[in-house]
Amino acid sequence: MFDRKLFFRLLWPVLIEQALATTIGMVNTMMVSGVGMTAISAVSIVSSLNFLIMNLFTSFATGATVVVAQSIGAGDMDKANRTAVQSMVVCVLTAVACGIAFLIFGGATVNLLFGEAEEQVKQYARIYLNYSALSYPFLAAFSMASGILRGSGNTRSPMRISILSNGINVGVGALCIYIFGWGVSGVGIALLLSRVASACLIALLLYHNDGVNIRKSSMKVERDTIVPVLKIGVPTCIDGLIFNGGKLIIQTFVTALGTAALAANSIAGSITELINIPGTSLSLVAVTMVGQAIGSRVYGKELRKIIRSLTGYAVVFLVVTTLVTVPLLPLITQLYSPPDDVKGMIYDVLNMVLLVMPLLWPVAFVLPSCIRSTGDSACVTVVSVLSMWFVRVLGAWFTVHYTGWGLMGIWLFWCTDWLVRGIAFIIRAKTSPYISGKHWQAQGKL
């Protein structure tokens, strides 16, 4: 049975956290806009690379969140604690390796992927990428710890730490940009310091936590503990790597359209993230609620009711935020101080996206979060990979090389990708043996 009180208790801290993260990202973009459109384009380029690497951390965190939620649902706190500690170790070590790789090869990567960008854009991108690489271990620690806490039903602590972290990000960023005049370097310094602070605070919290606690278990990685996390995390990671890799390839196509299109794409994406805060929040809450339901052996009709409710709430919330945001679009867009040609492209993209997003995005992304939380990760990965590359990436390539649709055409195929995913996930939700309970019955767990 869908627990509405639990849903809203979990949701509101996540909503605040996601709203802060998105708003701070917008504020950073606005501050960078004072340096020029080349700076916005550079940050946009690095953000594409960062999302690719961040996927590793969030994938591990998703696996840990599901296993912790299922363990708590089954009343096994010892397994929850062991999962938390060992997942943290694996995730942070992976982040250290990624950070070192980008510090060494980051400049070459920017030149390889975005060679057609202006030289000033590439120079700014290399600077920002170095600061991002240094922050990876701290970002990994915070992402994993936040996932563990959410899996245990604690969404308030990550929210509180996120508030402080984002405050540091904005305060230090404003100081570095407007007082010291450090431009893109200032944004990078602010990003690094905020992530160091959030990682230290949340690790300290998990060490002294009354629920899931990293102090109560050994840091030695054990196969029986980490494999269930990887069974969910690895397909999720492959999904995210290919998804964000596809977005990175699309970014190279946008680069070929010029600096104006690159800046418009960044700003339109930033505003879309603002509108989609409820959807992103519902995806995170879904992992905890469905995971704990599976741990409590809720299957079949009752589990499908929970999944339908979560997806339905996402639709309702996105309709509301879209209706509220549309009249404010001119004001929001003007905050980025875009030139008229950039502003026109932003309006064209957003007018199309906002028309379909409330209905398509929830079934394309919230529904698969529910399906993945049942343990059915492989199917979600297959659908995501095929749709990304055969609809979104191939469509972007076709747009740039064979049409004059420009940025509008690239986003048209983004929306088409949402539609294709949604249809596939609706079919899977109706037929999944994980949701019906047949899989668990075959495993002898019913």
Image (cartoon, rainbow, N blue to C red):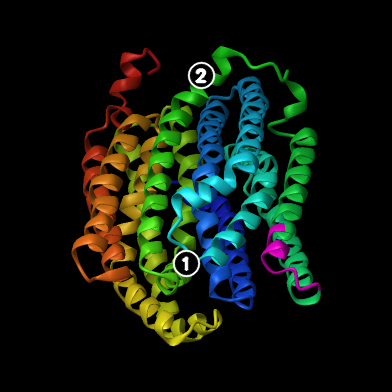
- In the image, is residue 286 above or below residue 270? above
Q: Assess disc 1: are there few (<14), some (14-19) or many (≥20) residues with their C-alpha within 10 Å of its C-alpha.
A: many
Residue 335 in picture, x, y percent from top left: 56, 82
The residue wearing badge 1 is 266
Task: Say which quadrant the N terminus sits in.
Answer: top left
Considering the numbered disc 1 on the image, is that residue within a helix, a strand or a loop?
Answer: helix
| Numbered circles on residues, count | 2
- The answer to which of 16 and 221 lies nearer the viewer is 221
Residue 24 located left or right of residue 60: right
Q: Which mark is residue 142?
A: none
Residue 416 magenta-highlighted: no
Q: Can you tell which of label 2 and label 1 is closer to the viewer?
A: 1
Task: Say which quadrant the C terminus sits in.
Answer: top left
- In the image, is residue 66 above or below residue 130? above
| Predominant secondary structure, magenta span | helix
Residue occupying image coordinates x 71% and y 50%: 195
- The answer to which of 296 and 212 lies nearer the viewer is 212
The span from disc 2 to disc 1 (Cα, nearest Å) is 38 Å
Q: Which residues are magenta?
A: 180-188
Q: Which amino acid type is shown beneath numbered disc 2? A: Val
Residue 144 in picture, x, y percent from top left: 62, 38
Residue 387 located left or right of residue 43: left
Residue 434 in picture, x, y percent from top left: 32, 28
Residue occupying image coordinates x 41% and y 63%: 255
Considering the numbered disc 2 on the image, is that residue within a helix, a strand or a loop?
Answer: helix
Residue 174 located left or right of residue 269: right
Residue 22 in picture, x, y percent from top left: 56, 63
Q: Is residue 297 visible?
A: yes
Q: Earlier in the sequence, mark 2 or mark 1?
A: 2
Q: Is residue 302 visible?
A: no
The residue wearing badge 2 is 227
Q: Assess disc 2: are there few (<14), some (14-19) or many (≥20) residues with their C-alpha within 10 Å of its C-alpha.
A: some
